[in-house]
Amino acid sequence: MLINLIWYYVQHQPEDARVTFWVELDGNENFERLIRAFPGDFFSSGRLEIKKLPLKITSIDNSSPLRKAFRLFAKFYRHTRTFKRLGIDSVLILGGDDISEYYKKWMILSDLYRIFRYSKKFPVVLAGQTIGPFKGLREKLATVCLSKTLIYSRDELSYLYLKDRLKLSEQKIHSSADLCFPELALQQKTDGILESLDLKANCYITLVPGGFYSLYTNDLDAYITSWAHLIKELLNTQAHRKRRIVLLPHVTRPEDDREMIIAIHKKLTSEGEDSERIRIIAEEMMPHELRFILGNGYLTISSRMHAALSTFQMKKPAVALGYSVKYEGVIGRSVQCPELVLPCSAKLLTNPKHFSIKVLDKTSYIEKHYEQLISHLDTRIPRLKAMAEDQIREISMAVKE
């Protein structure tokens, strides 16, 4: 999403304009990867500069309580002064769904208050967002803290929540689409990717078992067992006998999907299942490479929503293992494929046989309606792409005012 925001934002600037993005990223490696996500000549014109923020906004880590308390103080009282000193004149906060309480519970109050503090000093834009739902005091505080902020929701459900429940001004809220839907800056630079991985287009199923298992269940062993059981079932399903199973890490920090993939493969090996049809991708891929792999498989099964969305962006079907309202909003309403969402409770993820049955029901549906689904995506995705690009264009105009 950050790549697309920067890429399309610059396209909407006059040729003589110069834009500086200060971005929050963990470590120099992430910053270097961001720079490599653009064409080599993108920076040579002098129209764009990307710098790393000299402060940490996200504080969900293993720091001590004292350290976290210090960061909380900085969020409320020092960030705005630092922004002024750096010459920053507007704040853009990208979605998806960090402003939702199912990640942080009561800690979401600190994020809402931080946004409120920012909005008193700067134009603040929340882009590509799923916001809420909140409960009780948190909902009331959200109404106050977001009242001065320009918000672009990434689905209609979230927009209606902002309008009908939070009662935010309709001049401040807009219904749009996820920022992942436009083409990535290097999306056409795909020569040799499949060949280097010994894969053939449409001859594999991509599985993305996310490393954040606790969003589904606290039982790590059951989570691993369920994925391992699903893989064995897929390998033995008649319709997929000639297809490979690709285990793809879509996120490598702060959680690393590769650790989960290794654990799942270890489980399979311990049970005597070490098929040559299983392909583990251990390399850390660039975003356009990940999208190309996802979009050239027969279908995707993913616990990472953006892996499913990248598959849809490439006009291919995906089974999305949902754990929150964002799946209904983005995939059910925006992509208009509610039948491809499988709500996953802790009860389901701790019952490997039932989990596999439910997922295979979805893959069977995809097989029966494959051409219709592709035809639907071929029509729907360009509309979402246009909505997301319009969002960035409107943001580029709004922050100048």
Image (cartoon, grey):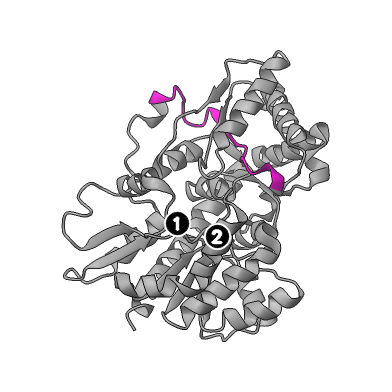
How far apart are the two marked residues, 1 and 2, measured between alpha carbons? 9 Å
Circle 1 residue: 1
Task: Name which quarter of the figure residue 49 lies in.
Answer: bottom left
Q: Is residue 197 above or below residue 355?
A: above
Q: Amino acid type of disc 2?
A: Gly
> Looking at the image, can residue 113 be seen?
yes
Circle 2 residue: 96
Q: Residue furthest front?
A: 66
Q: Residue furthest top?
A: 272
Q: Nearer the viewer, residue 264 or 337?
A: 264
Q: Which residues are magenta?
A: 196-214
Q: Secondary structure at mark 1?
A: loop
Q: Is residue 314 magenta?
A: no
Task: Name which quarter of the figure residue 66 lies in.
Answer: bottom right
Task: Tell me whether the residue at label 1 lies in contact with that at label 2, contact meaning CB atoms closer than 8 angstroms.
Answer: yes
Residue depicted at 64% across the width and 27% down the height: 263
Q: Is residue 236 above or below residue 398?
A: above
Q: Is residue 200 magenta?
A: yes
Residue 178 percent location from the top left of the image: 51, 61
